[in-house]
Image (spheres, rainbow, N blue to C red):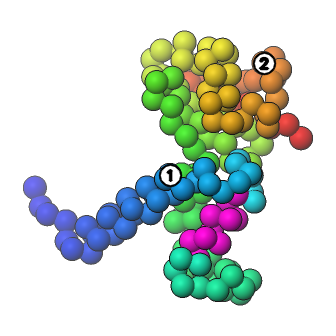
């Protein structure tokens, strides 16, 4: 087995550290599950990279990250893994629905509506989504839950 070159190792380490930083701090950017919370995170990152809070500086930061990295950071920011419930929650407010994914797709009982309601409550989404379970849509190992308007 060949060893990764130093640049690959450095890139992997920086990627890991950045995603862990987001996981560790994402709850501090209120209100959770909003575009505002995402913007606050991006401003915080830019300021900690030595940039000013001026609009052009923040736009430069966003452009420097690029679409691929920004998408990855955003996904990490708006996802939660609930290992004990065997669920992954993807709740990006830019999307029309919150997605609840089974981490045990062979056992669809993980998508039981009561279990999903527990997950929504635990991550603080209950007040933000449609609670009428008849509007929840199951698609194989995923349940789509609409946001409240």
Residue 26 lies, with reference to residue 81, above or below; the image says below
- Taking depth in this image into account, of 116 and 1 the one nearest to the observer is 116
Q: Quadrant of the N terminus?
A: bottom left
Would residue 7 be found to the left or right of residue 139 on screen?
left
Q: How crowded is mark 1: few (under 14 residues within 10 Å), some or many (20 or more)?
A: some
Residue 9, horizontal then vertical, whole percent:
25, 67
Q: Mark 2 points at which residue?
A: 133
Instruction: Say what secondary structure mark 2 lies in.
Output: helix
Residue 44, horizontal then vertical, whole percent:
61, 70
Query: Which residue sits at x=71%, y=54%?
Result: 30
Q: How many numbered circles are shown?
A: 2
Q: As drawn, which residue projects farthest toward the left?
A: 1
- Taking depth in this image into account, of 2 and 93 the one nearest to the observer is 93
Query: Which residue sits at x=27%, y=75%?
Result: 7
For the record, the magenta segment spans 37-46
Residue 19, horizontal then vertical, whole percent:
46, 57
Please identify the quarter of the rendering in which residue 60 is found. Answer: bottom right
Question: Label 1 to label 2, Cα distance in Å?
Answer: 29 Å
Q: Does the segment drawn in magenta span residue 83?
A: no
Instruction: Say the numbered circle drawn on residue 23.
Output: 1
Q: Quadrant of the C terminus?
A: top right
Please identify the quarter of the rendering in which residue 20 is found. Answer: bottom left
Would residue 147 be found to the left or right of residue 15 on screen?
right
Q: How crowded is mark 2: few (under 14 residues within 10 Å), some or many (20 or more)?
A: few
Q: Earlier in the sequence, mark 1 or mark 2?
A: 1
Query: Which residue sits at x=65%, y=72%?
Result: 43
**Which SS type dominates the magenta stretch?**
helix
Residue 137 lies, with reference to residue 26, above or below; the image says above
Q: Can the viewer see residue 134 in this picture? A: yes
Instruction: Kindly report which numbered mark, 1 or 2, lies closer to the viewer in this rendering.
Output: 1
Q: Can the viewer see residue 63 in this picture? A: no
């Amino acid at each position: 087995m060949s060893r990764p070159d130093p640049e690959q190792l450095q890139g992997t380490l920086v990627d890991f550290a950045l995603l862990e930083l987001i996981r560790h701090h994402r709850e501090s950017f209120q209100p959770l599950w909003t575009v505002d919370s995402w913007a606050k995170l991006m401003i915080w990152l830019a300021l900690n990279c030595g940039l000013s809070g001026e609009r052009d500086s923040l736009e430069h930061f966003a452009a420097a990250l690029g679409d691929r990295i920004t998408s990855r950071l955003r996904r990490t920011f708006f996802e939660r893994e609930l290992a004990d419930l065997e669920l992954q929650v993807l709740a990006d407010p830019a999307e029309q629905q919150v997605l609840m994914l089974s981490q045990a797709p062979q056992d669809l009982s993980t998508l039981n509506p009561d279990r999903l309601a527990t997950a929504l409550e635990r991550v603080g989404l209950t007040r933000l989504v449609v609670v009428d379970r008849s509007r929840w849509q199951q698609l194989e190992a995923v349940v789509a839950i609409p946001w409240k308007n």
